[in-house]
Amino acid sequence: MRKICGFLLRIMGWKIDHNLPSEAKRCVLVFAPHTSAWDFVYGKLALKSMGLNARFLIKKEMFWFPLGLLLKSLGAMPVNRQQAKRLPIHATKLFETNKELTLMIAPEATRKCTENWKKGFYFIATHANVPIVVAFMNWKNRKGGISKVIYPSGNYDEDLKSIQEVYFGMQGKHKGRFNLENTDKNE
């Protein structure tokens, strides 16, 4: 499956950096930009080509037949958005019961342009005591991969700056929907 995914990405013009840190086998994987469902599709292909079987959270309303079967086969786990405050506790239990777990989260939490990222990914990593692995799919140059590994320091604002600096200048499939596209690093 790795080779098939890699082949598909190559024929579509993508270059994936297959440098895979050991931390990626048990982490919260932050994935951006997320401006289209295609960002997710290409991202999943890239992660598969790297040998990662990332799981992801999606609103439980999407688990209707037959879509729910497809989502589960792709690694989806349903989330009750009414109980969002319990999500870090639930995700921590997932890490406790799984020796290897790559939990992929799009911190934008929407495909629309948003000013602020959701903090859940950070709280999950902190509660589960796992690193945050920063992954990307940049439609501007059709490159993707994993950029860095961050161990949460407890200072969300500083850690978020370090994470977001990876994404400056990148764009998702839909230009203009990614909140960091036109942000200057020195602002």
Image (cartoon, grey):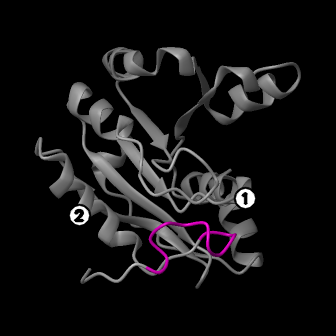
* Horizontal arrangement in the rendering, residue 32 relative to residue 71 (left or right): left
Residue 154 pos. (x, y %): 12, 41
Assign the magenta stretch its main secondary structure: loop
Residue 11 picture quarter: bottom right
Label 1 sits on what residue type?
Trp
Residue 175 pos. (x, y %): 65, 75
Image point (47%, 81%), residue name? 182
Asked whether residue 27 is in view, the answer is: no
Image point (26%, 56%), residue name? 160
Numbered circle sitting on residue 38: 1
Segment colored magenta? 172-182
Asked whether residue 24 is in view, the answer is: yes
- The crowd level at tag 1 (other Cα within 10 Å; few <14, some 14-19, many 20+) is few
Q: Quadrant for the C terminus, please.
A: bottom left
Residue holding disc 2: 162
Residue 19 pos. (x, y %): 39, 66
